[in-house]
Amino acid sequence: MAMIEPCLSFKEDAYCGLYCGACELLVATREGTLDALAEQRDMPPEDLTCYGCKTARSSIYCQTCAIKQCARARQVEFCVECADYPCERLRAFQGDGKPHKAVLQKNLAAINAQGVEAWLAAQQRRWNCPACGVRFAYYARSCRNGHAPVYNCEDEARDEQARGSR
């Protein structure tokens, strides 16, 4: 059974501008539902356990992230702080067709303008169900209490694309 490691804190901001707090792996780790998710994916829970990409305990998907490695090597907290921003690596990552990545540059601009604490507070509000306040993940259609619909990353990516094509 996967358990929360008491010595680790969750860190919900990522170098690239993703909000880790809406990742289903971090949500499942935090809520103690990782075993069920691991069974669905036919993977060991240890591979999926995640406290955020900036922590010592990130998922198998984030451990070898090229953006994470680059940001650490350049000693920046966010890609927007880099002299090469926005680089081809970030553009390719954002443009890979996964809807949860559609807002990376928008998020980085908000972090740069407002500061990370204000951005995190806004993201925490954004990724909580408006009906009951329960956190939901990027691709959720409803919160775990069954309130639907929630405005997920697919909705947000579609709206961002519509705004960009005007």
Image (tube, rainbow, N blue to C red):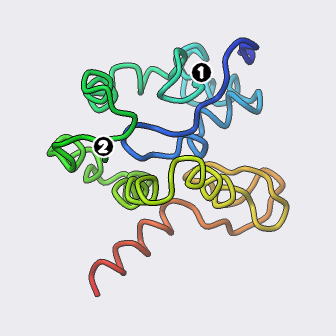
Quarter containing the N terminus: top right
Percent across and percent down for residue 159 are 44, 75
Residue 75 or residue 95, whichever sits in front? 75
Quickly name the residue at label 2.
81
Percent across and percent down for residue 115 are 50, 51
Q: Element at badge 2?
A: helix
Could you give the CA–CA distance between mark 2 and mark 1, rounded to whole angstroms? 28 Å
Quickly name the residue at label 1.
49
Residue 81 or residue 37, whichever sits in front? 81
When the figure is inspected, residue 12 is found, relative to residue 141, above or below; the finding is above
Quadrant for residue 7, please give it: top right
Residue 134 or residue 109, whichever sits in front? 109
Q: Residue at x 33, y 32 (%)?
A: 76
Mark 2 burial class by Cα count in 10 Å: few <14, some 14-19, many 20+: some
User: Which amino acid, by three-letter code, is at mark 1?
Assistant: Thr
Percent across and percent down for residue 147 are 79, 64
Which badge, 2 or 1, comes first in the chain's sequence?
Answer: 1
